[in-house]
Amino acid sequence: MLVHVAFGNTIAGLDRRVADGVYELSSRWPVVLWSAHVASFLGSTVWLTGVVAGVAWYLVRRDQHRRSVLLVAVVLGGVVINKTIKRIIDRGRPDFDDALAHAAGSSFPSGHAMNSMVVYGMLLTLGWWQWDPGLRRRLVVTGAVLVLAIAASRVALGVHYLSDVTAGLLLGLVWIASLTHLRRRSGAVG
């Protein structure tokens, strides 16, 4: 995906058709637009920073300093990766005459999608061994729906293309999976 966007942008046609169709839906249905704003807020820097700070503080209060530091470090690493790729690719955002929302900076990959995947994925990873299998399944489904809604909201608001949010989700997933794998290999599970 990164290669297609960076070199030749062969998926531009699909991106534009999806962006136009979703924009049309969002602009005609106020409930879709409202829902997109709510979901987008749950993936915003302000919200995610509050979630990470709150969980980190909770972990410190429970004498789980290493887990607190791990959470913050992984999230900050994800932010750095996202911003670095944005700077390298420097893809423009979708442009509509009557914009439904505004966002600054480059479009690819979506920071909302990637950062949400990293934050919510890390929360699941940190608590995984403490939960029974039924709760794990419910939390994974809830987390997946939330992260997908956040990603979809960015397209619905007309500030990202489908490939932007797809890349953000995949990069976030790869980042979490890589670190989880390294953590397990080092014996630091749980």
Image: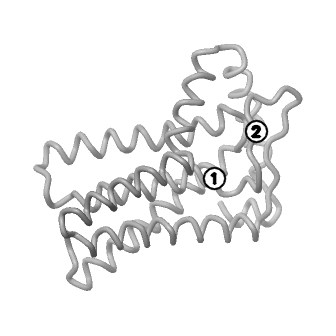
Quadrant holding the C terminus: bottom left
Q: Which of 59 and 138 is in front in this view?
A: 59
> x%, y% of residue 13?
79, 43
Name the residue at 64% across, 14% down.
29
Q: In which quarter of the image is residue 168?
A: bottom right
Of marks 1 and 2, which one's residue comes earlier in the chain?
2
Left or right of 37, for residue 140: left
Residue bearing mark 1: 110
> x%, y% of residue 93?
79, 47
* Whole-number angstrom distance, CA of label 1 to CA of label 2: 14 Å
Residue bearing mark 2: 102
Residue 188, relative to residue 2: is it above or below? below
Left or right of 70, for residue 94: right
> x%, y% of residue 157?
68, 33
Amino acid type shown at disc 2? His
Q: Nearer the viewer, residue 63 or 157?
A: 63
Amino acid type shown at disc 1? Ser
> x%, y% of residue 128?
21, 58
In this picture the colour scheme is one colour
Residue 180, relative to residue 118: is it above or below? below
Left or right of 127, for residue 78: right
